[in-house]
Image (cartoon, rainbow, N blue to C red):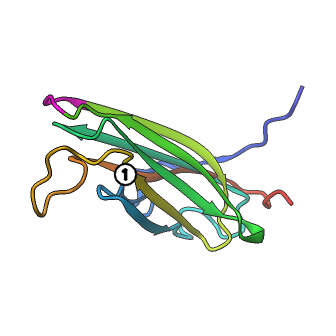
Amino acid sequence: MHRIAPWIPFEPTSSNGGILGSLPLNPGSVTFSIPGSVVPSGAGGVLVFAWARLVGPNPKIAYWHVGASVTGGAEDWFSLLVAGDPVNQTFVCNSQAFWLPMPIDGQLTVTLFVPEPRPIKRPGESEIQGYGEVEIHGYYPGAAAP
């Protein structure tokens, strides 16, 4: 039997640092710094939670790519996908938690992809109508894997 290493849970609402920020609602990327008060710089991994809530007519599919830069210029990542409804006034949501290695630069990059543009978009309106956040829910205290 494999041993599961202990990890340190973190309640994101226990301090302002656990909620990193809002998901982008327009195609493109945002970068969030992981506060040292939440995850020590020597941590081996971080448990990232992302959630999204869409309201009203939205793209059929939208997904956010959450990435962590690792040694050698590579990136480890996970995706949060939400299937919307481009016609009806609906309410849909989804969430995803995933372990990522502690980023070498201490930052997570979140990118929104919308494969199909919205059929109706007024000036000044976001590509997606809704809300979502990126949060830290824990970390692995050991060194990162080689």
Residue shown at 60%/70% (left/top)?
106
Instruction: Specify the farthest residue to the bottom.
Output: 105
Residue shown at 59%/43% (left/top)?
98
Indicate whether residue 110 is drawn in magenta.
no
> How many numbered tags mark residues here?
1
In the displayed structure image, the side of residue 74 where residue 123 appears, left or right: left
Q: Main secondary structure of the magenta part?
A: loop
Say which quarter of the image contains residue 102.
bottom right
Q: Which residue is mark 1?
A: 133
Q: Report the quarter where the C terminus lies.
A: bottom right
In the displayed structure image, the side of residue 97 where residue 14 appears, left or right: left
In the displayed structure image, the side of residue 31 where residue 86 appears, left or right: left
Toward the viewer: 33 or 73?
Answer: 73
Q: What's the magenta region?
A: 87-91
Residue type marked 1: Glu
Residue shown at 46%/68% (left/top)?
31
Residue 16 visible in rendering: no
Say which quarter of the image contains residue 101.
bottom right
Crowd tier of the residue under label 1, counting other residues whose Cα lies within 10 Å: few below 14, some 14–19, many 20 or above: some
Say which quarter of the image contains residue 16.
bottom left
Indicate whether residue 88 is drawn in magenta.
yes
Residue 124 visible in rendering: yes
Instruction: Specify the farthest residue to the top.
Output: 1
In the displayed structure image, the side of residue 66 where residue 123 appears, left or right: left
Task: Give percent across and percent down for residue 73.
Answer: 71, 70
Q: Give the secondary structure at mark 1.
A: strand
Task: Give percent across and percent down for residue 82.
Answer: 38, 36
Task: Give percent across and percent down for residue 38.
Answer: 54, 62
Toward the viewer: 33 or 126?
Answer: 126
Task: Give percent across and percent down for residue 111.
Answer: 45, 58
Q: Say if 33 sits above or below 25 in the image.
A: below
